[in-house]
Image: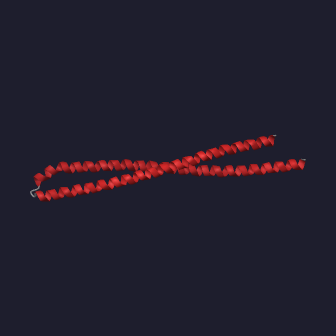
């Protein structure tokens, strides 16, 4: 009977050791996931900052374009050749339009990156929920094993 009790005790000890190893692995994975989540949130924050900077740049281009249009009248007074003036303004407008198109493309890329980051954050959060559930189940299993040992 004592040998049988010792064998049961050894089995419970081995199971407890295995449970502790699993808990350590899950805890390590939780830390890694938390770090990944923090990096993803930082990336998301960086993308939002980039989007804000893009908006400011877009506004600056519009302000610069407005400035060029406003200065057109002054340039017309100083320039004798109207065709040269018209070509100059057209080149500036084309450049501003090209810049605007580039900014809009960058904005679309930034939005796409933001969506990807959001998806990554949601995946990490789902993994964390699963990890918490696994830890809760493991804690319950440990409590049952301890109760069995005490009994």
Q: Where does the image place residue 128, in percent across and percent down from the top left?
A: 58, 47
Left or right position of 114 against 1: left
When asked about the image quadrant of residue 133, the answer is: top right
Residue drawn 66% across the image and 52% down it: 25
For the rendered model, the colour scheme is secondary structure
Residue drawn 79% across the image and 48% down it: 12
Identify the residue at the far left of this view. Answer: 80
Left or right position of 102 against 12: left
Q: Where does the image place residue 151, in percent across and percent down from the top left?
A: 82, 40
Identify the residue at the far right of this view. Answer: 1
When asked about the image quadrant of residue 109, the answer is: bottom left
The one nearer the camera, 134 or 84, is 134
Residue drawn 41% across the image and 48% down it: 48
Q: Where does the image place residue 76, in percent across and percent down from the top left?
A: 12, 53
Residue drawn 22% across the image and 55% down it: 93
The mark total stands at 0
Left or right position of 56 against 126: left
Q: Where does the image place residue 100, in percent across and percent down from the top left?
A: 29, 53
């Amino acid at each position: 009977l004592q040998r049988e009790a010792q064998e049961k005790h050894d089995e419970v000890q081995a199971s407890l050791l295995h449970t502790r190893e699993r808990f350590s692995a899950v805890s390590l994975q939780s830390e890694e996931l938390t770090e990944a989540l923090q990096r993803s949130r930082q990336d998301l924050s960086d993308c939002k900052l980039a989007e804000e900077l893009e908006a400011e740049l877009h506004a600056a281009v519009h302000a610069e374009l407005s400035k060029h249009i406003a200065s057109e009248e002054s340039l017309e007074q100083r320039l004798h050749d109207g065709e040269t003036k018209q070509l100059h303004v057209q080149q500036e407008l084309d450049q501003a339009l090209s810049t605007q198109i580039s900014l809009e493309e960058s904005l679309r890329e930034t939005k796409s990156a933001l969506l990807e980051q959001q998806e990554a954050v949601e995946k990490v959060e789902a993994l964390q929920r699963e990890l918490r559930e696994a830890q809760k189940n493991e804690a319950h299993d440990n409590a049952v094993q301890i109760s069995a040992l005490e009994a």
